[in-house]
Image (spheres, rainbow, N blue to C red):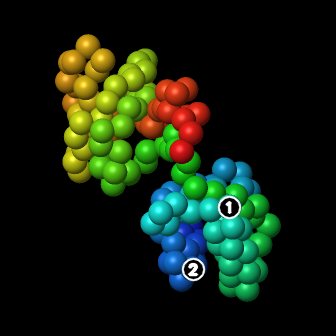
Amino acid sequence: MILTDDLKTLVTQVIKEEGYKLYHMELKGKRLHIYLEKKGGATLGDCEKVSKAIALRLAAEAAESRDLMLDVSTPGIERMLYKPRHFRDAIGERLQVKLAGEVIEARLVDANKEKIELETPAGMSRRISYNEILSAQVKRTTEELFKRR
């Protein structure tokens, strides 16, 4: 099954109507993964609310999508980065960036429409265009992950 423009529009519209923002959406087989954002952070209850609203809309309006399994969650603390906006929002964070034949762990110091700039632990600067990036993810140290709030 292909993620159609109609399905993208329907999901985006429901998320907006419910008061959230779409972070990313992808279809893997018959499972539709939806990542949502909310100022101050989305909760499990928020994800459940959006999942139910999308399921109802799909049942009512998109017969070909009724057999989809929905997976609604937040992007998480070690979120994947997909769009230039995601990279801009992650400036200052430590990233793991996968390129063809190379994995770089470095701090993101800049991001624009065409490329990102990383600073390695050795203090070296590296610019990488988005089309070179196979995947990118925010990385946290164990201490950051388990720090008490």
Q: Where in the figure is residue 58, as x and y percent of width and height?
A: 70, 77
Q: Where in the figure is residue 142, as x and y percent of width and height?
A: 55, 26
> Is residue 38 shown above or below 94?
below
**Cα–Cα span, label 1 and label 2:** 14 Å
Does 101 sit left or right of 71 as displayed? left
- Residue ID at (73%, 86%): 60
Q: Secondary structure at mark 1?
A: helix
Q: In which image quadrant can residue 27 be found? A: bottom right
> Is residue 30 shown above or below 108?
below
Query: To which residue does mark 1 refer?
Result: 44
Task: Specify whether residue 134 is in view.
Answer: no
Q: Which numbered disc covers residue 18?
A: 2
> Is residue 1 shown above or below 115?
below
Front residue of this view, candidates 56 and 139 = 139
Q: Secondary structure at mark 2?
A: loop
Mark 2 crowd level (few <14, some 14–19, many ≥20, 10 Å Cα): few
Pointer 1 with pointer 2, Cβ within 8 A: no
Q: Amino acid at mark 2?
A: Glu
Task: Point out the image quarter for the C terminus.
Answer: top right
Q: Where in the figure is residue 123, as x and y percent of width and height?
A: 21, 18
Front residue of this view, candidates 148 and 19 = 148
Q: Amino acid at mark 1?
A: Leu
Counting residues from the start of the chain, the first of labels 1 and 2 encountered is 2
- Residue ID at (43%, 45%): 81
Q: In which image quadrant can residue 93 be found? A: top left
- Residue ID at (77%, 72%): 66
